[in-house]
Amino acid sequence: MKEKNRNSFSGSIGFVLAAAGSAVGLGNIWRFPYLAAKDGGGIFLVIYLILALTFGFALLTTEVAIGRRTKQSPLTAYTRLHKKSGFLGVIACLVPVIIMPYYCVIGGWVVKYFVAFLTGDGVKAAEDGYFTNFITADIEPMIMLFIFLFAAAFVVFRGVNKGIESFSKVIMPVLILLAIGIAIFSVTIKNTDASGATRTGLEGLKVYIIPNLAGLTLKGFFTVLLDAMGQLFFSLSVAMGIMIAYGSYVKDDANLKKSINQIEIFDTLVAFLAGVMILPAVFVFMGREGMEASGPGLMFVSLPKVFAEMGAVGNVVGCLFFAMVLFAALTSAVSVMEAVVSSLMDKFHMSRLKAAAIETGIALVGGIVVCLGYNKWYFELPLPNGAVAQILDVMDYISNNLLMPIVAIGTCVLVGWIIKPKTVIDEVEKSGHQMGRKRMYIVMVKFIAPVLLTILLLKSLGILTVI
């Protein structure tokens, strides 16, 4: 594919909404609230916000600038920057290849719950064992995987303008409106339990946003720091090639500084709203202990129980909630798939149709393997970070805990010490707009980010256990 024929976003709004759609995914809506509940509410929020404005900003700016400067996807962009750095492009492309199958499986779970609440089966979805019985079934999870995957693939098949940009312009505003509406509802509800105690959503909101410093140790602080930093990978879609691919579609006269700031705002807003949507409602019906103990099962186990407790209105709220989660999951799945498709197109000069068909096939086969990991191929494997995993967890560990930090560290070393930060700064300022936080960016990409990322990687490998 020749660069002069390369597609591009029609304007900054299209790029921002597409990039924000990538950032606003299951990582925000599912993972962010339970980490916030586990890590002391407001403490996690404050640390996350500081990291988003520094660490996250540095990585996001770097990847978008690399994409626009090279007009290439992740697989080929690194070689354009520095001939000996092509291996980073290979790893960066491998990450979305690994993520796409299991992300679509989880997306299929969201489809299942959306259909359940849409058809009035919300109370049934709240029953003990519902989630486990579904994911361990032989056929139904594969059907839901198929539906979700082909919805995402359809958008990617249509291309950058008619597919990704048009889809994002419609879905993102709807997603934001749904999130705001559900958040307002969550804060305003109240419930009186059997003992006569009344809990309100506003009280749950206070638990969420007010820092809880009780019993916080230095080790506990580092745990929150690393949780927040790991969450940024999920939230901002960095270190997986997506922002390089999307950056390559941005026109040279676009204001990158403004666009990146808007993506940060979108991502942080939706992550915060996810907590407001979920945690006050869980607090009202399950108490503070329920907020902190829900863990990764918060969205598929605890929330349906909360919706069931709401009575007749719970089915409507549940339907709207899982519709919003489905939209968020789809926008992210589209971006993950596009990172691979654009790489195949740039590297092997194949058509979008062929590249998308190949990636759809890989994701479908991989997704079926992940589904089988919950029944016929079930196993338990201890990981270096102490977790016990099966197929989905192993893929998630390899992509998110190992490869993504390696890509991010390599990118920081490349930009900070080999091609120099000025390369990225010049790209951001090419349209005539000065780059904000310039000095902070240089310090972050050369020193602070590589150190933090190395600590995160060592912890994932089980080498660093004192934190």
Image: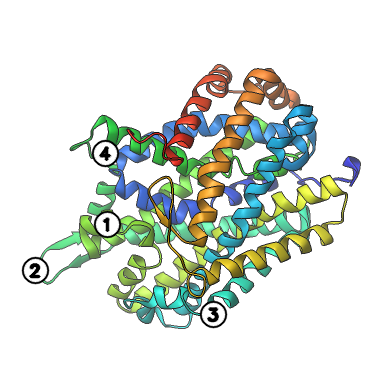
Q: Tell me the residue that label 1 is attached to.
A: 293
Residues at marks 3 and 1 touching, judged by CB atoms closer than 8 Å: no
Left or right: 148 with respect to 351?
A: left
Residue 113 location in percent, x, y? 46, 73
Dot 3 or dot 4, earlier in sequence:
3
- 261 up-or-down from 199: above or below: above
Q: Tell me the residue that label 4 is attached to.
A: 211
Q: Tell me the residue that label 3 is attached to.
A: 140
Cα gap from disc 3 to disc 1, whole angstroms: 29 Å
Q: Tell me the residue that label 2 is attached to.
A: 195
Residue 143 location in percent, x, y? 59, 77
Choose between 417 and 352: the one closer to the eye: 417
Cα gap from disc 3 to disc 4, whole angstroms: 42 Å
Residue 181 location in percent, x, y? 43, 60
Cα gap from disc 2 to disc 3, whole angstroms: 41 Å
* Mark nearer the viewer, 2 or 1: 1
Left or right: 157 with respect to 63?
A: right
* Neighbourhood count class around disc 2 (C-alpha, 10 Å): few under 14, some 14–19, many 20 upward: few
Dot 2 or dot 1, earlier in sequence:
2
Q: Amino acid at mark 4?
A: Pro
Residue 385 location in percent, x, y? 41, 45
- 362 up-or-down from 25: above or below: below
- SS for tag 1? helix
- SS for tag 2? loop
* Mark nearer the viewer, 3 or 4: 3
Residues at marks 3 and 4 touching, judged by CB atoms closer than 8 Å: no
Q: Amino acid at mark 2?
A: Ser
Choose between 236 and 456: the one closer to the eye: 456
Q: Amino acid at mark 1?
A: Ala
* Numbered mark located on residue 104 in the image: none
